């Protein structure tokens, strides 16, 4: 028979993995990593996002679970608004660059070069300019999703410090493992799309529109 602590931590691991697959997480990571190329860079990008996300949940979880500090509703609402604005900016930026590339394509009357200002761009340059960006986005995502996760702690009757810490660590580890897989899959997908500029442009359009739709969904929820 499984022990309660094992059941709790395995559940936290599974929930953390599922939590990483939230649409706003995937859209933000996909859009913001559009200048990264190669599975290694993309996995590193996703790990930085997961580290920011996990650190936020650990800090807030310990404050709520141990110190009994309640988070105001405005806290998570402000974080969700920030995520919506970030998705609007990222999605709009991708679509604007897509329009710019298509205009350049028409002027030049030839296919877009493989390393144009498209999805694959100069990943190393962008990583050097904004290495902290995925961490900051992960922090905001962690704050936005904290109310849902932390609400589970009292419902599950978790009051012991060790148990709370184990739950939060397993949840974070589940999120981290899933995001590693997401980064690896993105890297493989972009590698296979590199020789096909039209498919690349199509995926950029889908990503940009997905960001805008996710932002609209978040804003709709905030207005209800």
Image (tube, rainbow, N blue to C red):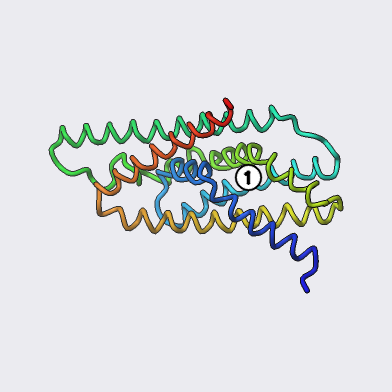
Q: Which residue is mark 1?
A: 53
**Image quarter in which the N terminus is found:** bottom right
Classify mark 1: helix, strand or loop: helix
Residue 149 coordinates in the image, percent (x, y): 69, 45
Tally the numbered discs. 1
Q: How many neighbours does mark 1 have within 10 angstroms: few (below 14), some (14-19), or many (20 or more)?
A: many
- Determine which quarter of the picture holds residue 224: top right
Kindly identify the residue that appears in the image at 13 percent across and 38 percent down.
109
User: Can you give x and y, in whole percent of width and height, for residue 158 in the image?
Assistant: 82, 52
Q: Is residue 33 left or right of residue 178?
A: left
Say which of 2 and 124 sits in front: 2
Q: Nearer the viewer, residue 107 or 152?
A: 152
- The residue most toward the bottom is 1
Could you tell me which residue is drawn at 55 percent across and 34 percent down? 83
Q: Residue at x 47, y 43 (%)?
A: 27
Residue 202 percent across, percent down from the top left:
30, 44
User: Where on the picture, by quarter, is residue 186?
Assistant: bottom left
Q: Residue at x 57, y 25 (%)?
A: 223
Relative horizontal placement of residue 181, taking residue 15 as reference (left or right):
left
């Amino acid at each position: 028979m499984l022990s309660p602590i094992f059941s709790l931590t395995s559940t936290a691991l599974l929930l953390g993995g599922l939590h990483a697959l939230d649409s706003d997480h995937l859209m933000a990571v996909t859009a913001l990593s559009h200048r990264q190329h190669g599975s290694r860079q993309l996995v590193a990008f996703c790990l930085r996002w997961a580290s920011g996300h996990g650190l936020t949940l650990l800090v807030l979880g310990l404050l709520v679970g141990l110190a009994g500090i309640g988070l105001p509703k405005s806290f998570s609402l402000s974080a969700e608004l920030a995520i919506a604005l970030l998705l609007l900016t990222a999605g709009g930026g991708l679509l604007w660059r897509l329009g710019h590339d298509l205009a350049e394509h028409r002027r030049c009357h030839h296919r877009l070069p493989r390393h144009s200002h498209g999805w694959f761009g100069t990943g190393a340059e962008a990583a050097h300019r904004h290495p902290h960006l995925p961490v900051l986005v992960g922090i905001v995502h962690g704050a936005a999703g904290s109310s849902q996760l932390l609400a589970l702690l009292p419902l599950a009757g978790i009051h012991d410090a060790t148990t709370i810490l184990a739950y939060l660590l397993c949840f974070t580890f589940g999120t981290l493992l899933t995001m590693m897989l997401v980064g690896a899959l993105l890297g493989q997908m972009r590698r296979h799309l590199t020789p096909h500029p039209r498919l690349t442009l199509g995926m950029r359009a889908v990503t940009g529109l997905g960001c805008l739709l996710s932002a609209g969904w978040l804003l709709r929820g905030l207005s209800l």
